[in-house]
Image (spheres, rainbow, N blue to C red):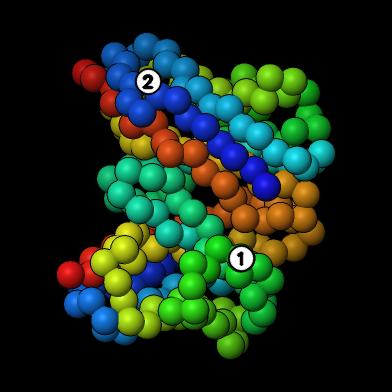
Amino acid sequence: AQTVTQSQPEMSVQEAETVTLSCTYDTSESNYYLFWYKQPPSRQMILVIRQEAYKQQNATENRFSVNFQKAAKSFSLKISDSQLGDTAMYFCACNGGSNYKLTFGKGTLLTVNP
Amino acid sequence: GAGVSQTPSNKVTEKGKYVELRCDPISGHTALYWYRQSLGQGPEFLIYFQGTGAADDSGLPNDRFFAVRPEGSVSTPKIQRTERGDSAVYLCASSPGGAGGPKETQYFGPGTRLLVL
């Protein structure tokens, strides 16, 4: 079983600045995967970035990067050069082992201000 | 190419009625997932299909929820005797279902918002 905790219900950032969203997790699996999904008002969940737990190197996708601290079970998302289109709910999620189902946190509403 | 589609986009029904949802996954994806997202919450897992069979239905809350995928493509879950607590957004996702396993990207549809009055 997995649990995912996002302790920041809402955050805001000025356009072009950098923001970090926090996530902690717990899992009994030895091999697991962590994800950040974005959900704009259209409701469609879009994958932002994925991290495989056995890889020490932090994943990066353009302006999005993660800080994966395995011992602390922490998986934060950094958004650089924030854009207005980044405004959305952001969900941290985990799955692992032979378990395909994703366990999501409660989400963080990010607002990028002009 | 076409993404995951879900119909209807919105559904309003009365308590006690029967509703049916529909998900068309990405063509060729053998894995299909259903999640339920209540207001202010993250999605919660309901059921996972690999091909025609339900590989994991541990998230179904009770026997009023029933889902099949007879031809391994479209999925049409049904909710019998709806209750107000069933009001939520129902999200469908699909993934290739190959050797990628749990690390496969799940591609989500836009969801069906169900309101039970």
- The image position of residue B112, as x and y in percent, is 33, 65
Residue B100 found in image quarter: bottom right
B54 in relation to A65, above or below: below
B25 in relation to B39, above or below: below
Tell me whether circle 1 and circle 2 mark residues in contact (CB < 8 Å): no
Kind of residue at disc 2: Ser
Protein chain holding label 1: B
* Disc marking residue A73: none
Kind of residue at disc 1: Ser
Frontmost of labels 1 and 2 is 1
Q: Residue under label 2, please give it.
A: A82
Quadrant of image for the C terminus of chain B: bottom left
B58 in relation to A51, above or below: below
Protein chain holding label 2: A
Tag 2 secondary structure:
loop
Q: Residue under label 1, please give it.
A: B58
Name the residue: 69% across, 71% down: B55
Tag 1 secondary structure:
loop
Q: Are marks 1 and 2 on the same chain?
A: no
Decide if residue B103 is in sight here.
no
- The image position of residue B64, as x and y in percent, is 43, 79
Residue B48 found in image quarter: bottom right
- The image position of residue A11, as x and y in percent, is 33, 21
Residue A81 found in image quarter: top left
Label 1 and label 2: CA atoms lie apart by: 39 Å
Name the residue: 38% across, 69% down: B6
Q: Residue furthest bottom?
A: B70
Q: Nearer the viewer, residue B51 or A86?
A: B51
Q: Nearer the viewer, residue B10 or B19?
A: B19
